[in-house]
Image (spheres, rainbow, N blue to C red):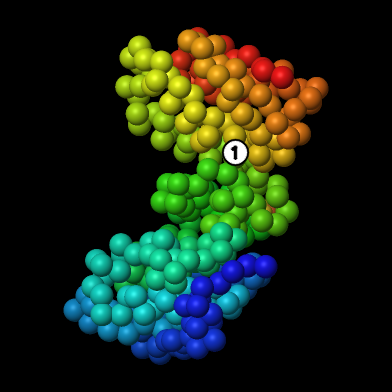
């Protein structure tokens, strides 16, 4: 059972700004009825200030509350200010959303982005086609997946599904989502190259090993029902223990060498050796 904040419940029961602005200066649509959630946002704009905002949504209580919150947040703001609103701001306004419902806040920020694009004369079709469709069930592009991973520091497929819905139906896009996650996590590490190139102190090595296990290795194992525990770091020898479905698995040795050791060599030091502690 999901826990909703009082603000979400209030806006779900009594949403504000529901409806259509017939002579809107900007319109943004996100989602689709086929996918179960759809939002259209209408803006009235004068001298680059949003003087009115309304919405129509087809979706759950969180989608209604998120859309209502968004319209309240942007009224009176300049286009430049509204452009900076992210799904996190919507979630903060609501006092939180269940993880499984984060995609409702993303739908709001995406619809707003499209409305502003249309106001600026960027063709909606052009905006829609940005990026490559990764999840065909929900029409989610790699551009949106990467954006949400970066903005919300997502690390697992489950989180990507919660925020974008990608991967939440037939599951045939999971492998592609994992590739994008791997690339993004690698990019984050590559932005801190100094730690990899210079000789590491023991403390720095332990910190990097812990971070790589937490950010890169554990999410992969958890997706398969496994887990890992760091037991000790002795120089360049890293002792770990596999847990869950990985413990005692016939492929445990392959997991240790091809996933754990490879990733640690990639992100920490090229001559790290991983040893299983049973
Ligand atoms: S293609 Fe992504 S869930 Fe079906």
Residue 84 appears anywhere in the view: yes
Above or below: residue 23 compared with residue 248? below
Q: Classify residue 218 by image quadrant.
A: top right
Q: Position of residue 151 (x, y in %)?
A: 41, 51
Q: Is residue 277 left or right of residue 9?
A: right
195 vs 21, nearest the viewer = 195
Q: Classify residue 51 by image quadrant.
A: bottom left
Above or below: residue 60 compared with residue 253? below
Q: Residues within 10 Å of mark 1 (few under 14, many from 20)?
A: some
Residue lying at 53% horizontally and 43% vertically, measured from the top left: 155
Q: Position of residue 3 (x, y in %)?
A: 59, 69
Q: Position of residue 257 (x, y in %)?
A: 64, 17
Residue 56 appears anywhere in the view: no
Q: Is residue 32 left or right of residue 203?
A: right
Image quadrant in which the C terminus is located: top right
Residue lying at 30% horizontally and 62% vertically, measured from the top left: 84
Look at mark 1 in the image and give the residue it sits on: 219
Image quadrant in which the N terminus is located: bottom right
Q: Is residue 254 left or right of residue 233?
A: right
Residue lying at 46% horizontally and 15% vertically, measured from the top left: 269
Residue lying at 49% horizontally and 20% vertically, measured from the top left: 266
Above or below: residue 167 compared with residue 38? above
């Amino acid at each position: 059972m999901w826990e909703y904040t009082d603000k979400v419940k209030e806006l779900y029961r009594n949403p504000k700004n529901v409806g259509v602005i017939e002579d809107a200066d900007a319109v943004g649509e996100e989602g689709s009825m086929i996918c179960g959630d759809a939002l259209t946002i209408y803006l009235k704009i004068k001298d680059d200030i949003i003087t009115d905002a309304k919405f129509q949504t087809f979706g759950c209580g969180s989608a209604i509350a998120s859309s209502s919150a968004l319209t309240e947040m942007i009224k009176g703001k300049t286009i430049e200010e509204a452009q900076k609103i992210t799904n996190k701001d919507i979630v903060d306004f609501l006092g939180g959303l269940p993880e499984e419902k984060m995609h409702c806040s993303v739908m709001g920020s995406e619809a707003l982005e499209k409305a502003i694009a249309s106001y600026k004369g960027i063709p909606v079709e052009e905006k829609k086609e940005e990026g490559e469709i990764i999840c065909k069930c929900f029409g989610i592009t790699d551009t949106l997946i990467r954006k949400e991973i970066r903005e919300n520091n997502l690390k697992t497929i489950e989180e990507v599904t919660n925020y974008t819905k990608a991967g939440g139906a037939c599951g045939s896009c999971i492998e592609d989502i994992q590739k994008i996650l791997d690339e993004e996590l690698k990019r984050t590490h590559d932005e801190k190259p100094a730690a990899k190139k210079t000789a590491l102190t023991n403390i720095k090595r332990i910190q990097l090993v812990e971070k790589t296990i937490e950010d890169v290795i554990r999410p992969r194992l958890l997706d398969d029902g496994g887990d890992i525990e760091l037991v000790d770091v002795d120089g360049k020898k890293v002792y770990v223990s596999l847990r869950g479905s990985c413990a005692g698995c016939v492929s445990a040795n392959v997991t240790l060498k091809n996933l754990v050791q490879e990733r640690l060599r990639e992100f920490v030091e090229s001559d790290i050796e991983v040893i299983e502690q049973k």
